[in-house]
Amino acid sequence: MSLLRRLPHYRFLRKTSFKSFHSNSTPGSLFPYCQSFNSVCLCYTKRMLPPSDLKRWLCYQATVDQRTQGLCVKEQRLVDRLYSGLIQGHRACLAEAITLVESTQSRKKEIAQVLIQKVLSYHREQEKLNKGKPLAFRVGLSGPPGAGKSTFIECFGKMLTERGHKVSVLAVDPSSSTSGGSLLGDKTRMTELSRDMNAYIRPSPTRGTLGGVTRTTNEAILLCEGGGYDIILVETVGVGQSEFAVADMVDMFVLLLPPAGGDELQGIKRGIIEMADLVAVTKADGDLVVPARRIQAEYVSAMKLLRKRSKVWRPKVMRISAKTGEGISDMWDKMMEFHDLMLTSGELITKRRKQQKVWMWNLIQENMLDHFRSHLAVRDKIPLLEEKVLSGVLAPGLAADLLLKAFKDGL
Ligand SMILES: Nc1nc2c(ncn2[C@@H]2O[C@H](COP(=O)(O)OP(=O)(O)OP(=O)(O)O)[C@@H](O)[C@H]2O)c(=O)[nH]1
């Protein structure tokens, strides 16, 4: 209780009586964070909130308040402006908000977190109004270079906006951090969709690690949803690690494959195929119909051997052509079928909850590594030890032990 007394809302809650609190309380895990203060009070007065959760919520709220109070007037104004612009659907505010979360400056990162927290609370409230159903459908799209991803997104996106959806396309492209250029997210690849007022295409950041890019993509998804986009397409090139990260951010993972021979598909990792909820063989038109049929048949039999990941859904393999539009509408029907089955079975909500945890641990991992590399006790030792490992004088394990010990001693 002493902790509760120190918290800002304690006195108010006290007024509403703490007496009959222990009886009839629901399990703590059912009570989601990020509720508004009013809804917490309501839960509390209806005896739906166990004391442990109330305490956790108050601690959490105090941290958020502290963070918000830590902003200067100018920063607070920026957060308020971006937040209100965002939820009113202003694209410029959405773009500015994503730029803020992409920033590598530590102060801007802090401001971005306050904004994210506000959007998250808004999001939860909206979901509650939507009877607990997610507001947007998050789809990951992956495929090797030249598979026809951008042509597909252009055609698919236009079909969706014509049907009244608001579509946002985000790109995860860590390859750009090493090559210096961006493979994905280039607006010129989807000229018509980028002119559509109900579509928002976000070019990929051109620097940063995979961890950094995935962190900002997760936050960008949230911001787009706050901005009213109900379909979020996250595009990635299926040749690296990024698609594994994307699979941890989306509701459905779609793999686009060109009707090419085995050699050309060598670069596709088996793990990626295992993650796919839907495989679409692209360019199934003209002379390519026959090879597309063959690839489809090969994947249908290969996917039968894969471990079942869902109780309600077996991955499907389809043929599509963005050029003729064939199969695109059927593909959307299949995707909606997946969405509805996953939602009614409860698997979608479970998946999203697990993803939140993965997201948190990814952030910790990334920050810990940054902290480690820049720590005074190890910073100067790293180049020397790296050189010794490279020249074979020192075993990597020993070098790692030395650095970790120096770090621990320096804490
Ligand atoms: N025949 C046919 N060609 C297509 C189709 N879709 C894409 N293409 C062609 O395939 C080539 C690659 O298409 P993109 O959409 O740029 O492929 P991508 O996967 O985005 O490629 P990257 O930007 O390299 O990742 C282009 O020359 C397209 O014209 C299709 O449905 N049918």
Image (tube, helix red, strand yellow):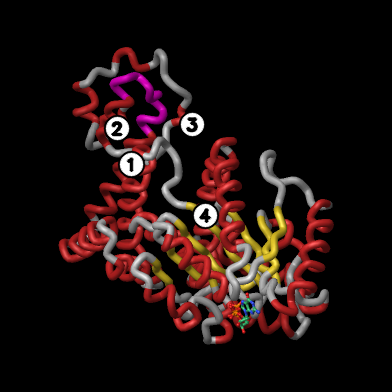
Q: Report which residue position mark 4 lands on.
A: 359
161 w.r.t. 68: above or below: below
Q: Cβ(mark 3) to ligand 1 < 8 Å?
A: no
Q: Secondary structure at mark 2?
A: helix
What secondary structure is found at the residue carrying circle 3? helix
Q: Amino acid at mark 4?
A: Trp
State which mark lies toward you, 2 or 1: 1
Name the disc covering residue 125, or none. 1
User: Where residue 23 sits: x, y (%)?
Assistant: 40, 13
Amino acid at dot 3: Ser
Which residue type carries mark 2? Ser
x then y, percent, for residue 303: 79, 55
Q: Earlier in the sequence, mark 3 or mark 4?
A: 3
Pick whichever, 68 or 388, lies toward us. 68
Residue receiving disc 3:
29
Residue nearest the viewer, comparing 145 with 60: 145
Q: Which mark is residue 96?
A: none
Q: Which mark is residue 39?
A: 2
Work out how far the residue at label 2 is from the one at label 1, CA to CA, in angstroms. 9 Å
Looking at the picture, which amino acid does disc 1 mark?
A: Glu
Whole-Å distance between the Cαs marked 3 and 4?
A: 19 Å
Name the residue: 26% across, 30% down: 5
Write the start and end of the magenta stretch as one range: 44-55
Give coordinates of residue 359: x percent, y percent. 52, 54
Q: Where is residue 347 shown, x and y percent of the image?
A: 59, 40
Q: Is mark 4 within 8 Å of ligand 1?
A: no
